[in-house]
Amino acid sequence: MNLEDHSRIPIRVTNLWRCGEDSKVTIISDAEFRIRIFKINAVGSEIWKLCDGIRNEEDIATILQDSFDNRPTFEVIKSDVSKFLNYLRDQWLVLWKTELEAEGLR
């Protein structure tokens, strides 16, 4: 899917997730008629928590940029966020807000 950043606003499509004591997220998905469990690392967990239907991809990258000690460039962070969001989308864990609106679901 080739959307501009401002329209790439991710929304979690499952409420079956929890944050462990280590702040890492575990997601349970029943997409595609099968149960799958995803255990996400610390950075991925922060991205997941920010998939609220309000923040776009660039907003998420900006928030994450402040959390890194070694300060990778914004372009690197944005690229990594984009790749991870695409992975979540491919797994049917998030959809873009525009997709939900097109279907009349939001």
Image (cartoon, grey):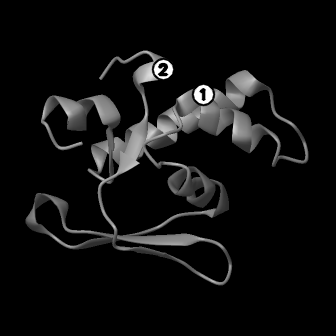
Mark 1 falls on what kind of element? helix
Q: Nearer the viewer, residue 79 or 6?
A: 6
Observer-nearest of 31 and 105: 105
- Position above or below: 88 against 42: above
Q: Percent x, y for residue 93?
A: 32, 54
Q: Is residue 80 left or right of residue 62?
A: left
Considering only order in the chain, which callout, 2 or 1, is on the residue closer to the N terminus? 2
Q: Is residue 8 left or right of residue 81?
A: left
Mark 2 neighbour class, 10 Å CA radius: few under 14, some 14 to 19, many 20 or more? few
- Return the x and y of residue 17 as percentages of the image width and height: 41, 72
Which residue position holds label 2?
Answer: 6
Specify the farthest residue to the right: 69
Q: Residue at x 42, y 28 (%)?
A: 8
Q: What label sits on residue 58 in the rendered view?
A: 1
Task: Specify the farthest residue to the bottom.
Answer: 21
Q: Residue 30 occupies which quadrant of the picture?
A: bottom left
Q: Residue shown at 41%/40% (left/top)?
A: 10
Q: Give amino acid for label 2.
A: His
